Amino acid sequence: MNNEMDTIVYRLGATCGIEDVEEGKTYEARVQGFANFGTFVLLNDRVKGLVHKSNQKLSHRERDPIVVRVLSIRKNGNIDLEEVTPAIYHTQTVVRKTPAVRLSDLASKIGRTVMVEGEVAQIKQTSGPTIFTIVDETGTENAAAFIEAGVRAYPEVVVGDMVGILGEVMQRNNQLQIEVASLAVLSPDEADTVRERINRALDDRAEPEEIPFLVESEVLEKLRPELRKIAKIIRKAVFTAQPIVLRHHADADGISAAVAVETAVIALIRESGADFDAENYLFKRAPSKAPFYEIEDVTRDLDFATKDSVRFGQKMPLILMMDNGSTEEDEPSYRMARVYDLSIVVVDHHHPDASVDQFLEAHVNPYHAGGDFGITAGMLGTELARFIFPEVEERIRHIPAVAAVGDRSEAPERNRYLALVADTCSEEHCKEIALALDYEQFWLRFNDGREIVRDILNLNRNPERHARLVALLVREANLAIEEQLRASMPHVQEQLLQNGARLFSLDVEIYAHRFTFPPPGKTSGEVHDRLCRRHAGSAVVTLGVGPDFAVIRSRGVLLNIPRMVRELREEIDGGGVNGGGHLVVGSIKFVEGMRDTVIARLIEKIGEYPLEHR
């Protein structure tokens, strides 16, 4: 009995080869097939042997488990086995004797056969081979497995599996690729060991550099830990070939924030060893018309993500929200995203609602550090981009200044960022770039316009085209604004509120051109600017009113628009009120039939807020 208790049956690791098999030892195996002279068995997916019919003890069917002892290993690689039937035994896993090659070392192994271990990050079926994207602690590479044209190789392997691959390192179209000889899913013990090793190394590799901010800022310093946390999450997503969807508000500030991060992420994707097309399927920038994550947006994102997961074997994406994402208006979409276990991180400067944090992996917002919306999304996005990939700094250091003037920041950081680039990008030119972004994005609608936007921001390193394009767009935008104001200004109505503020209202539905630039929000802003200049020294509030919405702009009144929205929703039964924005700049929506009631109560509330002491 003691001998039986001491019997060891070895389990050959998935990446082991014939060199790891020893004569006289007993192994777990499975039946592969039959011949007149015996039974072929697999010790793992790479190692095969023969049990001669004279050495069989039991009857078997294909894929049945079987325990075998190695009688001999011939010089030609054939393994002779006999079946054994121990009543009691325990197993030990055999670990491959030759260590795996790291993916970062493949460039020095071209033309040689290597063993690699890693996680399957993507499986793409082409008209020829099946392409497995493999990630280890050092990089990302593709492995091509061919059964026959268009037929899925190793169908048992799925995204997320830890695998061992044996194959020859080749170079095709200037890209490294492993030509797969064998591919096997690692055993649970092996997978845990490899996963722990990779995760530990990736965690260190994803840690951002500790670098100073571009300008001095007490608020930014307080936000540093959370900015670094989001940078690490993004870097780890790149290193593990997880797609990233960047959702941003479609105005100059949101575009600036997003494009700064886009520049850094694409540079990191290229450096990490991904294939030449990876930046197109691993990163997507998507503008949102509203300053929150609308159901339409999340539905579109989930539609693309689930299709890509099924068609191309991709992981579900990381969602990065910029210049939106901090308010309770985002929560319906967050709840939908949670159904699909999407990870979400937010970089925003709208007044936050604490209830959203339950849905988020990380959340950067200046209000969390004693700041306000004057720390713009473009400032935060540029500093985040530098943590993601510091080498992009010279290309994007002017972006915070563009965002600052585009979003009319009055924070002290505004002048510091402007001073940083004063020798190469004047304040006036920053304003022109911001206006050009707003104008062009209006016509782009939901498209990202990647290359056009990069030309506007002078990121394509073609200064002549940048100058000509910005000049043209600014001219067209100003002509459109002048035409809109010529039509609208005569219809502005004024009233004096109980707090002493001047309230100006304009029906942008009937007294402004529709479906053209500037849209209602921008039109209301331009009207507000003119009225502020006309009534210098007075507190001014401007309402741009539509059939089911109102846009609010305020100077000199200490409003809290998100709070007003919540109060109106509770107070007006059947009003359907929602919306939000910054404290003094925002918008509300309501049902059309309740317009007069909602607007009247809104004006009452504005009149109850105190004036700013100047």
Image (cartoon, grey):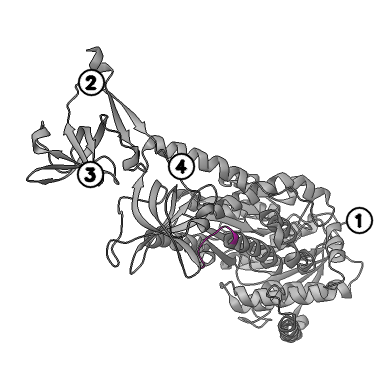
Is 71 above or below relative to 164? Answer: above
Identity, as a three-letter code, of the amino acid under mark 4: Pro
CA gap between label 1 and label 2 equals: 87 Å
The residue nearer to you, when weighing 240 against 32, is 32
Please rate how many residues cluster around mark 3, counting C-alpha atoms within 10 Å: few if below 14, some from 14 to 19, many from 20. some
Residue shown at the point (30%, 50%) measured from the top left: 156
Q: Is residue 239 left or right of residue 18?
A: right
Is 116 above or below relative to 244? Answer: above
SS class, disc 3: loop
| Any part of residue 493 in sight | no
Residue holding disc 2: 88
Which of the two discs, 1 and 4, labels the residue nearer the N terminus?
4
The residue nearer to you, when weighing 119 against 80, is 80
CA gap between label 1 and label 4 equals: 71 Å
Looking at the magenta stretch, what is its main secondary structure? loop
Q: Is residue 105 left or right of residue 20?
A: right
Q: Is residue 53 left or right of residue 47?
A: left
Where is residue 361? Give x, y as percent. Answer: 59, 46
Q: Viewer-nearest of labels 2 and 3?
A: 3
Where is residue 527? Give x, y as percent. Answer: 77, 75
Residue holding disc 3: 78
In the image, which disc is placed on residue 99? Answer: 4
In contact (CB < 8 Å): disc 2 and disc 3? no
Residue shown at the point (22%, 44%) measured from the top left: 78
CA gap between label 2 and label 3 equals: 29 Å
Residue holding disc 1: 613
Where is residue 258? Give x, y as percent. Answer: 65, 63
Quadrant in which the N terminus appears? top left
